[in-house]
Amino acid sequence: MLSVGIGVSLYRQLLRLYPAIYREQFADEMTAVFADVEADTLSKGKLARGVFWTREIAGIVGGILHEHWRALGGDSVGLCFPTRRFTMRTEFRFPKTTAALMTIILAGVVLAIKKGETISSSPVNPPIGPLPPTHSVLLGGIFLTLAFFYAAGMIGWAILFAMRRSGVHRLAETAGGPR
Amino acid sequence: MTLHDMAFYDMSSEAVMESLPLTEPVMLILLSLADQPRHGYSILKDIEQMSDRRVVLSTGTLYGALRRLLDDEWIERMEEEESSRGRQAYRLTRRGRSQLQLEVGRMKHLTRLANLRIAAKEA
């Protein structure tokens, strides 16, 4: 599994995607809390660590999108933005789309962990000879991943909209349903 | 002071109606801060304990909610000379406590109503 140092380093890289004002206010604190929570998971199994990473990445991606949306002036949603209202749905509902998305995210996490293991198991002393040029692919990869998921989400929504099964249609059906 | 009075304590009734009902993460964060100020890690652990591990927040979700609560002045950062940058504590403001009490009152009313309706159906 990913070592503590690599995990925190990866988390810091993800925090760089937040707006600057948010980062200035919370990045250090979030990193410290993340390090504490990650340390708690060290004694747990691989599954628990996988769930932890899935939850963290999903939370941070959602947070990044929301904070950028807010920075663009779209924060009329305020405290009502997060889902899971007491009045709107039960806690036990688990839509199929959520399961599919979580599987995709988990696959991404497992790939990241495998890559981290490869990096950490690479020889400490590099072979003698001219050093190859190095460059970071992490940020580009993150942007690419975000763009991929965004595009996948848009396509999924378009399909649902075309099938008249989107949230808007369901709401309209509910409003116009039997009285 | 009644719940109704509290609604007009420091905000208009319109503002109260807009902010209720609270989302579950926000409700649990406010509950966690109700008895004492806490740091981020302590809030996460307290929420896990309160919900029997049914609700486990990520750090991204927690700090997104804390940012909004700070903006709305429902919570505040504590002035602590000894605290490091990575260990800020938060506490409820009077406004936050009023909101929490209003929400608890709303839920009590809902529970009472639900019990009455269910009992009437069973009778």
Image (tube, coloured by chain):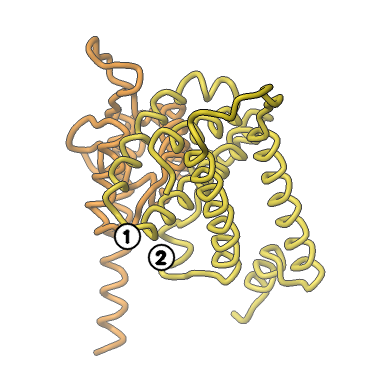
Q: Which of the pair B87/A68 is nearer the observer?
A: B87
Identify by letter the chain in orange.
B
Chain A, hue in figure: yellow
Asked if residue B75 lies left or right of residue B37, the reply is right
From the top left corner, tell me how far across and down residue A27 is, in percent. 46, 25
Q: Is residue B12 visible?
A: no
Q: Which residue is mark 2?
A: A91
Residue type, label 1: Arg
For the point 34% across and 22% down, which residue is it? B86
Mark 2 residue element? loop
From the top left corner, tell me how far across and down residue B8 is, in percent. 36, 35
Residue A162, quarter of picture: bottom right
From the top left corner, tell me how far across and down residue A38 is, in percent. 35, 42
Q: Which of the pair A99/B97 is nearer the observer?
A: A99
Above or below — where is A25 with respect to A60?
above
Q: Which residue is mark 1?
A: B54
Asked if residue A15 lies left or right of residue B85, the reply is right
In the picture, the quarter occupied by the C terminus of chain B is: bottom left
* Badge 1: residue crowd in 10 Å (few <14, some 14–19, many ≥20): few
Q: Cβ–Cβ below 8 Å for labels 2 and 1? A: yes
Residue B11, quarter of picture: top left
Above or below — where is A45 with respect to A64?
below
* Badge 2: residue crowd in 10 Å (few <14, some 14–19, many ≥20): few
Check the residue under mark 1 and report the chain it is in: B
Outermost residue on the right side: it is: A162
Numbered label tally: 2
Outermost residue on the left side: it is: B35
Asked if residue B71 lies left or right of residue A96, the reply is left
Q: CA distance from mark 2 to mark 1?
A: 9 Å
Residue type, label 2: Glu
